[in-house]
Image (tube, helix red, strand yellow):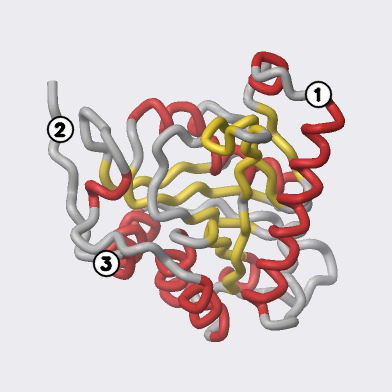
Amino acid sequence: MSRRAEVFADRQAAGRALVERLHSAPIPTAPIPSGSNEGQPHDRIVVLGLARGGVPVARVVADALGASLDALVVRKLGAPGQPEFAMGALAAGQVIVNDDVPRRLGVSPEQFQEVVDREEAIRIDREHRYREGAEPVVVEGKTVILVDDGMATGSTMAVALRAVGASGAGAVVIAVPTAPDDAIRRFTADPAVDAVVCVSSPEPFHAVGLSYRDFHQVGDDEVTRCLRLR
């Protein structure tokens, strides 16, 4: 059985389609702490765009919801000398290892840590540059909407989910314009996820980019411009 994909003009159009889905399904909200002055629903929501491609989509979502926006940089942990082999990924100090890939590739714990340290330094530098010196948006106790321009395997989203959980998010929504059914089921079944919102689930699923007419590579300058509006 095949199911045709919805094709978005660009990431902004995908963001608008995602907003429609978010409006049609109630967004889980974290409880308001006693004594908090954040009385409006949008005060309790933070939209995090996975950099780089997810940030333009997240900008549209944040604007529509009147919510704060920030970028979350996820870095792949490529094997030494074989960067195409992902040993895992990291975000905001949280590391996920892909099963026993480091052992199978003959990567020692010391070599693995060197890769982690290098990628973490890159992550910190990029997030600092994207924010132009501004402080990160606080997610503790908030409803966090994790937005990317799509999911394929879900591995990037998995480390982003761990990162916001470690930061104390009160509720987590995963929102993507396109993803395969198995990735959606994976996160729907995850107790750390309060809701999964997806616009299009083509079958068979080949690549995120096939759901877009314009799927240009998002550069650092575009991410920075999106965050300036926060």
Q: Is residue 164 visible?
A: no
Location of mark 1 (residue): 108
The quadrant in which the C terminus is found is bottom right
Instruction: Name which of mark 2 and mark 1 comes first in the sequence.
Output: 2
Residue in the foreground of this view, choosing between 188 and 206: 206
Location of mark 2 (residue): 3
Q: Residues within 10 Å of mark 1 (few under 14, many from 20)?
A: few
Measure the C-alpha gap from mark 3 to mark 2.
Answer: 21 Å
Instruction: Name which of mark 3 and mark 1 comes first in the sequence.
Output: 3
Q: Position of residue 210 (x, y in %)?
A: 23, 47
Q: Residue at x 57, y 71 (%)?
A: 69
Location of mark 3 (residue): 13
Residue in the foreground of this view, choosing between 200 and 43: 200
Left or right position of 152 against 91: left
The quadrant in which the N terminus is found is top left
Q: Residues within 10 Å of mark 2 (few under 14, many from 20)?
A: few
Asked whether the beta carbons under mark 3 and mark 1 sit within 8 Å of each other, the answer is no
Q: Residue at x 41, y 74 (%)?
A: 64
